[in-house]
Image: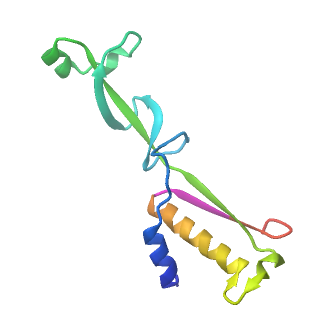
Amino acid sequence: MIPREILKKVKRIEIQTRGLVNNFFGGEYHSVFKGRGMTFSEVREYQPGDDIRLIDWNVTARSGNPFIKVFEEERELTVFLIVDISASGIFGSGSHLKKNIGAEIASVLGFSAIKNNDKVGLILFSNEVV
């Protein structure tokens, strides 16, 4: 069961990306790579060197100048959360122990990434990877 306070924080936080990511996976973010991807982006005027297979003949016929279709590939992020669970996590006072705060931060970031349809991984370590 997920504590209610963490769920409230997940609803308030949003992992900020610049919308364009340079990643090699598919998902919710738009790639900086322009090309024949999955999502139509825009129509722009033909420039020498453009792929002639991308010419939008309807727009070209209406305007009298050649225009091409531009597409963007959808991408997603892969988020790895690396959390220290060593004995130093006992440092703090009351409910403000390092281990509790670390768990809360990892939970909020993880659930926020999942909400954005990103892949999430968790690595726990102390004096060795667990």
Q: Is residue 8 left or right of residue 122?
A: left
Residue 41 is drawn in which quadrant?
top left
Residue 130: x %, y % from top left: 78, 69
Position of residue 51 measured from the top left corner of the image (x, y, whole percent)? 38, 16
At 75% from the left edge and 83% from the top edge, which residue is drawn?
92
Extreme-front residue of the structure: 93
> Residue 20 at x, y = what percent?
47, 41
Q: Looking at the image, which residue sits at the far bottom?
A: 94
**40 or 88: which is nearer to us?**
88
Q: Is residue 29 above or below residue 14?
A: above
Q: Main secondary structure of the magenta part?
A: strand
Picture quadrant of residue 94: bottom right
- The residue most toward the top is 48
Magenta stretch in the rendered image: 117-122
Q: Is 109 within the magenta?
A: no
Q: Nearer the viewer, residue 35 or 100?
A: 100
Residue drawn at the location 56% of the way across and 65% of the way down: 109
User: Which residue is located at x 37 percent, y 38 percent?
Assistant: 38
Image check: 46 left or right of 14?
left
Say above or below: 92 vs 69: below
Q: Which residue is located at x 77 percent, y 77 percent?
A: 89
Residue 33 place in picture, x, y as percent: 47, 32
Which quarter of the picture shows residue 126? Answer: bottom right
The correct choice, above or below, for 87 with respect to 59 in the image is below
Q: Residue furthest left?
A: 62
83, above or below 39, in the image: below
